[in-house]
Image (cartoon, rainbow, N blue to C red):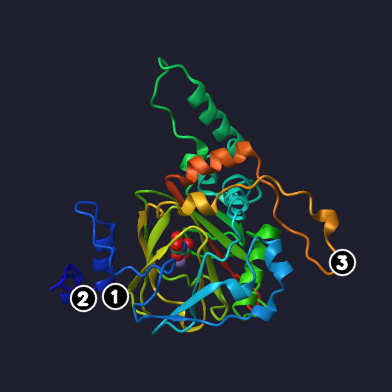
Amino acid sequence: MSKMAAVMESGEDAFKQLFKFYKRRKPPPDFSDVIDFSGKVCTGKVDPIQLSPRAVSDAAASSVGLRPVRDWRAFGLQGFPGFIFISNPFQRGSQPFWIRQCLKTYPQKPNVCNLDMHMSPCDTKDIWERSVHSLSVLTCSSPSAPRRHEKSLLERLRWVTLGYHYNWDTKLYSADNYTPFPADLQSLSQQITLGCGFSDFRPQAGILNYYRSDSSLGIHVDESELDHSRPLLSFCFGQSAVFLLGGKQRQDPPTAMFMHSGDVMVMSGQSRLLYHAVPRIVPSPPGLLTSELQNPPSPPNQQNQNTPTEKSSVLEPVSERDWTVCLGYIQSSRINVTVRQVLGAEQNFPHS
Ligand code: OGA
Ligand code: MN
């Protein structure tokens, strides 16, 4: 009997057991049952799925750093209708912009982050600049300088919320805790959902999770949004992870899959409210980050070259200095961005 079968045999709470199985360090688990969409998928559990290439022009896709929809490799999982896994639809060289946004731009005010919970707004005003400063002070310091340093703010960043700010204590969103959702991430999310055949997705809330190599995310369902008929998007950057997708009941046995940098997941329809978890961060496959994440020399300014029918790009060049810091960060960390529509088309928050 395989280790996996042994784990499953005890029956109850299969999800919890598999979570522990993949989280275990010593000895490390066998990953051979983890679906890897970046390679050949022939497990019998996976179906390639047809997207809607005509719903997104190549220019619109390119304006957010995505390849044409006809080139996206998208998969469904048997038994999980509405679940869509898009294996890295990003153009080579466009992930650096999104990673820079996640590390430098989105943690800035008016967005909210974990550091705001116990620090004054003035102390969390400039997470990026202060961290870059302390990191460079560190690299410049003499060998005699104390080697143990206080963690930079960037290293202490755990989450950022966007739009309707998720309240981690009440698990609620509210009308009066809202700041504008970033236009670039809104546009990226809309191209993804259009490509998947959803016509009017409204990105209203975002949660960024920052994982170190020993982090995990427990078993949960995302049900705080008031309208569950809209898809939920999940973007991954940096190090890889094992993702577990379970069923409608917490204890239902989950399916394990790798998420690599650039991968996008869509949980919609009957898969919108399934239990899921991230038991483990794993090193990204050799060469994957280096090939995908080359920060190309800034292209000539395309702004003036756009014809009236073309969409102007939201991508901005990432400076060498910024990219060096980002690269150092994702060498050992993973970033996950989930984008959610909170309210239905005609819906409002209930009066309290
Ligand atoms: C979440 C979530 C999964 C991930 O933020 O709700 O499930 O891949 N994230 O980090
Ligand atoms: Mn979730």
- Residue 239 is at least partly visible in this image: yes
Residue holding disc 1 = 251
Task: Pick the residue in front: 71 or 122.
Answer: 71
The amino acid marked with disc number 3 is Pro
Circle 2 residue: 12
Residue 350 position (above or below residue 316): below
Q: Is residue 350 visible?
A: no
Q: Residue 40 falls in which quadrant of the image?
A: bottom left
Query: Gap in Å between the C-alphas at discs 2 and 1?
Result: 7 Å
The reply to whether callout 2 and callout 1 are in contact (CB within 8 Å) is yes
Q: Mark 1: give few (<14), some (14-19) or many (20+) Cα within 10 Å.
A: some
Which badge, 2 or 1, is on the more N-terminal residue? 2
Residue 308, label in figure: 3
Whether disc 1's CB lies below 8 Å from ligand 2 is answered: no
The disc at residue 199 is none
Most distant residue in the top direction: 144
Residue at 56% over, 38% down: 324
Q: Which kind of residue does numbered mark 1 sit on?
A: Gln
